[in-house]
């Protein structure tokens, strides 16, 4: 018994929802922007082989790989550790430390594949909790704004509730999301360390107004209002100067007519929201010529992906 899964790249925060909002991505050209994982039942032990364009950035020792650790954790929780084994093959397609939810993609792919392989022993909420916990080992703290959209697809809002983990928000289907990965790697833990320990009351209220207004705009299908509220008061002011080329690019994207732009997750990927394919292509061309700084950098014109992680 074996299966293969695909787990999409994600944009966390979306400017307005630090740690609370994230979207799954699907490139409009149909290309792959997410990790793939093959999982197979074996008699004993865990084995992991890695391939793909970014496998050279992963730990050499399999046990240090987060996917291996996900399998260990899953089998322990299932109570079958040592009694049954799994063979895993990870195709690492997302750059590490890119701001595109690379670690979430690997973690979600691993838990999703294992849960399917063992005929769904864990319900979604339990699975999501395990995903968040393991992803937190890589990023330095537990936050679900990559994990939730990667797992479930769409635009996900994280809730502070025992009843429901997250809520799927309606999204503007005619928007294009251009993402540009510059090619450098930034550690999420270090980018989080740049943020203040506490925020002023004025910032707290502004954050609440922006996020609640954005959610209202999605439910009332008011794109103009939504765009006007896509502002980041929590992370961008402290992170932007640590992302080479970001401030200049943001100014230029505005001049090119992008509706909004921001840092994807903790960077260095930046995203731009565009109202037409023509504008998205123009923005993408500018970013390709001016924002990419290292080999491996890329630009993709995307839509929000309705589909999260799934078997292929
Ligand atoms: N919300 C997180 C952050 C996403 O910005 O630190 C990064 O994984």
Image (cartoon, rainbow, N blue to C red):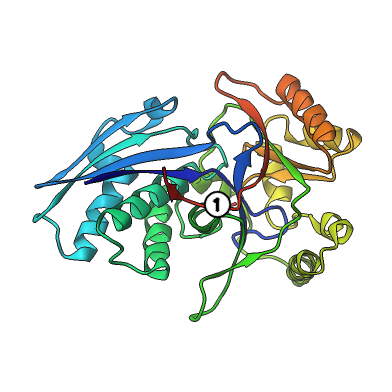
Residue 64 shows in this picture:
yes
Vertical side of 131 occupied by 85: above or below: above
- Name the residue nearer the viewer: 238 or 215: 215
Horizontal side of 34 relative to 41 (left or right) equals right
In x, y percent, where is residue 99? Answer: 57, 42
Residue topped by disc 1: 307
Identify the residue at image location x=26%, y=57%.
Answer: 73
Horizontal side of 231 relative to 312 (left or right) equals right
Vertical side of 199 occupied by 178: above or below: above
In x, y percent, where is residue 199? Answer: 69, 65
Residue 266 shows in this picture:
no
In x, y percent, where is residue 258? Answer: 84, 40
Identify the residue at image location x=21%, y=64%.
Answer: 78
Vertical side of 308 occupied by 247: above or below: above
Q: Secondary structure at mark 1?
A: loop
In x, y percent, where is residue 238? Answer: 69, 48
Residue 87 position by quadrant = top left
Residue 224 position by quadrant = bottom right
- Name the residue nearer the viewer: 117 or 110: 117
- Name the residue nearer the viewer: 310 or 99: 310
Q: Is mark 1 within 8 Å of ligand 1?
A: no
């Amino acid at each position: 018994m074996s299966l293969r899964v695909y787990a999409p790249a994600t944009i966390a925060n979306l400017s307005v929802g630090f740690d609370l909002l994230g979207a799954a991505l699907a490139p409009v050209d149909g290309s792959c922007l997410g990790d793939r994982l093959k999982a197979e039942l074996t008699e004993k032990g865990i084995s992991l082989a890695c391939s793909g364009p970014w496998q050279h950035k992963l730990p050499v020792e399999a046990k240090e790989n987060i996917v291996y650790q996900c399998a260990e954790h899953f089998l322990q929780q299932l109570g079958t550790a040592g009694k049954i084994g799994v063979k895993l093959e990870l195709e690492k397609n997302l750059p590490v430390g890119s701001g595109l939810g690379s670690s979430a993609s690997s973690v979600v792919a691993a838990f999703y594949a294992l849960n399917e392989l063992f005929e769904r022993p864990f319900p979604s909420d339990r699975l999501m909790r395990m995903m968040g916990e393991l992803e937190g080992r890589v990023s330095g703290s537990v936050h679900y704004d990559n994990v939730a959209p990667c797992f479930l697809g769409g635009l996900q809002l994280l809730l502070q509730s025992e009843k429901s983990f997250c809520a799927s928000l309606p999204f503007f289907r005619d928007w294009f999301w251009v993402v540009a990965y510059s090619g450098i790697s930034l550690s999420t833990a270090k980018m989080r360390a740049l943020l203040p320990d506490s925020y002023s009351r004025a910032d707290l209220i502004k954050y609440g107004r922006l996020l609640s207004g954005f959610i209202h705009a999605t439910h009332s299908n008011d794109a103009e209002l939504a765009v006007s509220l896509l502002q980041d008061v929590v992370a961008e002011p402290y992170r932007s100067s640590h992302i080479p080329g970001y401030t200049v690019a943001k100014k230029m994207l505005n001049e090119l007519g992008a509706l909004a732009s921001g840092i994807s997750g903790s960077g260095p990927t930046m995203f731009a929201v565009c109202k037409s394919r023509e504008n998205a292509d123009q923005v993408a061309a500018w970013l390709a010529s001016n924002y990419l700084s290292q080999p491996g950098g890329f630009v993709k014109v995307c839509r929000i992906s309705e589909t999260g992680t799934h078997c292929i």
